[in-house]
Image: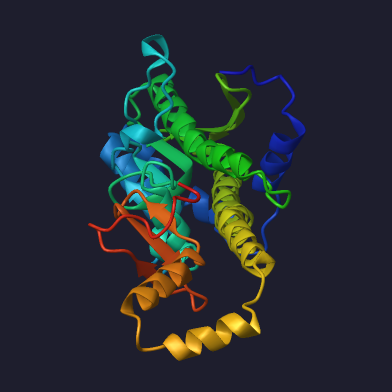
Amino acid sequence: MRPRYEPFPEHIANVVDYAGKKRDSPGPSPDDVYRDMALDELEMRGLDEPEVEDYFRDRVFPKPNPGDDLRRSDRQPMSRHAVPNYGSSLRISNPTPDMLYGYSRHHAFPDQQTQLISMGNEMNGTVNNQELMYSFFVIEFKGNGGDLWVATNQCLGGSASCINIAERLNRQLMESKSSKIKPVDSTAFSIAMNGTEARLYVSWKHNELDYYMQKVKSFLLQDPEHYIEFRKHVKNIIDWGKDKRLKEIRESLDSPLEESRKQASEAAKSRPPPTKDSTSKSKRRKGSNSAHDTEQARSEQEDLYWQWSETAGQYCHVNPDRSIEWTPSTQQPPYPESGH
């Protein structure tokens, strides 16, 4: 946990500034908030965590529609492979955030399915068993008698797992050694809150072992101005996630595949064309030598670029129309493994 008076690194400061920018979309007025009796009851009656969560779920944290790029999971454990673990002394328990924003696998990445399949769930950004991808926003609730420091510790674990998933993609990108690859932003946001106060945090990876979390701002939710400011930050963080950050991830997932296609194309162009003599011999033998035909078919297979899919346990090839061709599960790769 980093002291709040420490200045943010430049790239973190830019994201934090985006979270606090003005919005054009309409929201509640100060008078609307002041007259909100349900909000008032959160303080006056000291309601428990479920009531606090129900209130803010309906009014502040939007539930994406089924066909949206964005997705929200509620109270779903994050997968063990998402959790950073550098030894027993630093082990983080499996986070189960009250709310977690990320992306829908099939709606957010329709053109990257081949790459996601080839990477396997443990490497492709899958967060939980609901196929939430590359999460970036953790929310933890407490009742008015609950300890916000407990919620803050839960935010630490959830945010570190979000960062770990994005950084895993960055490591894969670096291994590809392509000059066009740009690392994705692994910054994550989190909120620890009850019915009267919300604490907004930002987290990032400082080096190979250290994850930093720092408070951005605290909001007194019974104050109309603070409530409106809090709502604005939440909406902006979600907009950042579904726009700029999602675009970066899509481009990064495309990069290794495009690089592989480029290498395969260059390799094909470097092969000499068949000679006139060999072409005429091939025509004379056509239909009379099944062994030759088999060898020729194998040679054509070897011209293709095949990828190993950890999920399917098979090799696959992407055709120009983006359809996927698979080898039978019992068949060996059609050529010595490339890219596996």
Is residue 5 in view from this perspective? yes
**Residue 137 in the image: above or below residue 217:** below
Q: Please give the name of the residue rendered at 55% of the width and 88% of the height, measured from the top-left corner.
A: 280
Q: Position of residue 48 (x, y in %)?
A: 27, 34
Q: Nearer the viewer, residue 272 or 146?
A: 272
Looking at the image, residue 8 sits to the left or right of residue 203; the answer is right
Furthest residue toward top:
89
Residue 19, x across and y down, in percent = 64, 46
Comparing 161 with 32, the one in front is 161
**As drawn, 231 above or below 138:** below
Residue 224 horizontal side relative to residue 179, left or right: left
Q: Nearer the viewer, residue 28 or 133?
A: 133
| Residue found 34% across the figure and 53% down from its top | 131
Taking the view exactly as shown, the residue that stands out farthest to the left is 330
Q: Which x, y percent locates residue 222?
A: 49, 39
Q: Quick check: can you spot residue 43?
A: no
